[in-house]
């Protein structure tokens, strides 16, 4: 059964403030004494919100550093690529990544 809002414009009451989320992503630092703000992975990756201090730039940097440290410890050399993807609610890409935006990649 489709959701009651399917095919309709979203009501103002459920819209997010993108500028507020973006500002919190870059400016809010996680409280390391709060378990809710530490990096935590679910079945589909990291879960969190920049407003709650549980997903921000510090988290991305910590995850990237952990990957680099692990690769070094295991003697793994060479390039490592990471990319972001956009997905729908069901975890399937809404369109092939090469058609929607240039993926962000880092060489680790």
Image (spheres, grey):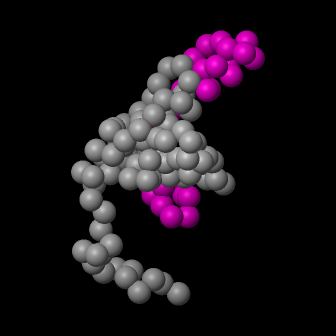
Q: Residue furthest right?
A: 74
Q: Residue furthest front?
A: 33
Can residue 86 be seen by looking at this rendering?
Answer: no
Is residue 78 inside the magenta stretch? yes
Q: Residue at x 60, y 20 (%)?
A: 68
User: Of 95 and 35, which appears nearest the observer?
Assistant: 35
Residue 67 spot, x, y in % from top left: 62, 26
- Residue 104, compared with residue 53, is above or below; it is above
Residue 75 spot, x, y in % from top left: 73, 12
Q: Count the labels in the image.
A: 0
Can residue 26 be seen by looking at this rendering?
Answer: yes
Q: Residue at x 40, y 49 (%)?
A: 50
**Magenta region's main secondary structure?**
loop
Q: Is residue 103 left or right of residue 80?
A: left
- Residue 12, compared with residue 87, is above or below; it is below
User: Of 18 and 100, which appears nearest the observer?
Assistant: 18
Q: Which residues are magenta?
A: 66-94
- Quadrant location of the C terminus? top right
Is residue 71 inside the magenta stretch? yes
Q: Residue at x 32, y 51 (%)?
A: 21
């Amino acid at each position: 059964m489709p959701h009651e809002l399917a095919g309709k414009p979203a009501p103002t009451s459920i819209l997010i403030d993108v500028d507020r989320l973006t500002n919190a992503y870059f400016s809010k630092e996680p409280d390391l004494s709060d378990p809710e703000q530490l990096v935590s992975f679910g079945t589909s990756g990291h879960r969190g919100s920049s407003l709650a201090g549980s997903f921000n730039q510090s988290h991305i940097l910590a995850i990237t550093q952990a990957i680099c440290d692990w690769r070094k410890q295991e003697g793994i050399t060479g390039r490592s690529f990471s990319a972001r993807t956009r997905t729908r609610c069901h975890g399937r890409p809404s369109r092939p990544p090469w058609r929607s935006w240039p993926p962000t990649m880092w060489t680790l």
